[in-house]
Image (spheres, grey):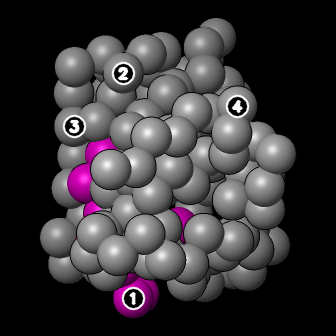
Amino acid sequence: MIVRSLNDVEATDHFVEWGNGTSHRLLTAKDGMGFSLCHTVVRAKTVSLLQYRNHLEACYCIAGEGEVEDMEGNVFVLRKGDMYVLDKYDKHLLRGGRDKDMILVSIFNPPLDGTECHNLNDPKGSAY
């Protein structure tokens, strides 16, 4: 059995400041579960161009609000109780809310090592 808290993770290198928010990597590859579980904060008024080229991701919004936009210009508003899935290694824009941070539960397959960090200055989008 694995029991771990956000506070536990904050004392490790699995608490990642990724540029426009934070990610508590609660489960990682070393835990042997076959997926990662993260508590992700997307700061209000931020925009991030992202693409996970090596991972599929599912996100469930547990608080706040924000948006995800695909590369065809389709914008999806996200609020508590909404989810989105990047099932084709989709490049996307992730936006925090106008006034509120968006808090997500993120699941990655295959699992993250836990210390990956975005490069938000890459014009092609941050990828890992």
Q: Which residue is mark 2?
A: 62
Q: Residues within 10 Å of mark 4 (few under 14, many from 20)?
A: few
Q: Which mark is drawn over residue 54?
A: 1
Reading the chain from its start, which is encountered first: label 2 or label 4? 4
Q: Which residue is mark 4?
A: 7
Q: Are marks 2 and 4 in contact (CB under 8 Å)?
A: no
Location of residue 18 by image quarter: bottom right
Residue 95 position, x and y percent, is 54, 39
Residue 86 position, x and y percent, is 25, 64
| Callout 2 secondary element | strand
Reading the chain from its start, which is encountered first: label 1 or label 2? 1
Give how far apart the Cα atoms at labels 3 and 1 are.
Answer: 20 Å
Give how far apart the Cα atoms at labels 1 and 2 are.
Answer: 25 Å
Task: Answer left or right for 77 relative to 44.
Answer: left
Task: Answer left or right for 12 relative to 27.
Answer: right
Q: Residue at x 60, y 14 (%)?
A: 100
Location of residue 11 by image quarter: top right
